[in-house]
Image (spheres, rainbow, N blue to C red):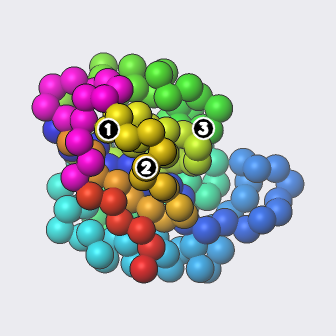
Amino acid sequence: MLLFVMRHGHAEPFSKSDETRALTDEGRAEVAAVCRERASELAQVKTLWASPFVRTRQTAKIVAETFGLDVEVQELLTGDTPVSTLLEAIAEAEESIFPLMLVGHQPQVGSLVNGLCGSGDEHPMGTASLACVKADEVWALDCAELEWLQHKP
């Protein structure tokens, strides 16, 4: 099974709260460019989950519009949710929703990718970075392989 993990695009530095920070024009362009670079792989995605924060929903919307998907907002993808809790949700998800794509924040997305692959902090997740992780049957720490990691162009 495949899991795609994306960090939101570049966001404005200030807003009323962290939750309301929006993507910049640069951030929108980064996300669109990564979608173009990985179009054939992302065309496989069946389900798209995003954090409720503005910048992640905006990032997910770009992906959704490009590939004809709906965005499901998931509170689990806020940065303060432990990776173990997120992993439980992924592990309990029906196989029929895979390939699944998550759009979230650092440090959670980096911890998820590196934790699944048992790679410490080897794989950085900058803005608009997109990782493809593969697992046979189990979504747990050290039980997956990094297929590829795409950074913004």
Q: Does the rendering let one see residue 125?
A: yes
- Which residue was labeled with disc 2? 122
Against 131, residue 141 (above or below) is above
Indicate the position of residue 28 as horizontal and vertical percent values.
Answer: 53, 74
Q: Specify the segment rendered in magenta.
A: 135-147
**Does 138 lie within the magenta span?**
yes
Q: Residue 149 sits in which quadrant?
A: bottom left
Indicate the position of residue 72 as horizontal and vertical percent values.
Answer: 43, 42
Indicate the position of residue 118 as horizontal and vertical percent values.
Answer: 35, 34
Contact? badges 2 and 3 (CB < 8 Å): no
- Magenta highlight: main SS: loop
Against 123, residue 9 (above or below) is below
Q: CA distance from mark 1 to mark 3?
A: 21 Å
Going from N to C along the chain, the mark reached first, 1 or 2, is: 1
- Which residue was labeled with disc 3? 78
Q: Residue 57 sits in which quadrant?
A: bottom right
Q: CA distance from mark 1 to mark 2?
A: 10 Å
On-image quarter of the C terminus = bottom left
Residue 117 - label: 1
Residue located at (63% from left, 48% from top): 53
Indicate the position of residue 94 as horizontal and vertical percent values.
Answer: 23, 26
Q: Amino acid at mark 3?
A: Thr
Q: Residue 22 sits in which quadrant?
A: bottom right
Q: Amino acid at mark 2?
A: Glu
Which of discs 1 and 2 lies nearer the camera? The answer is 2
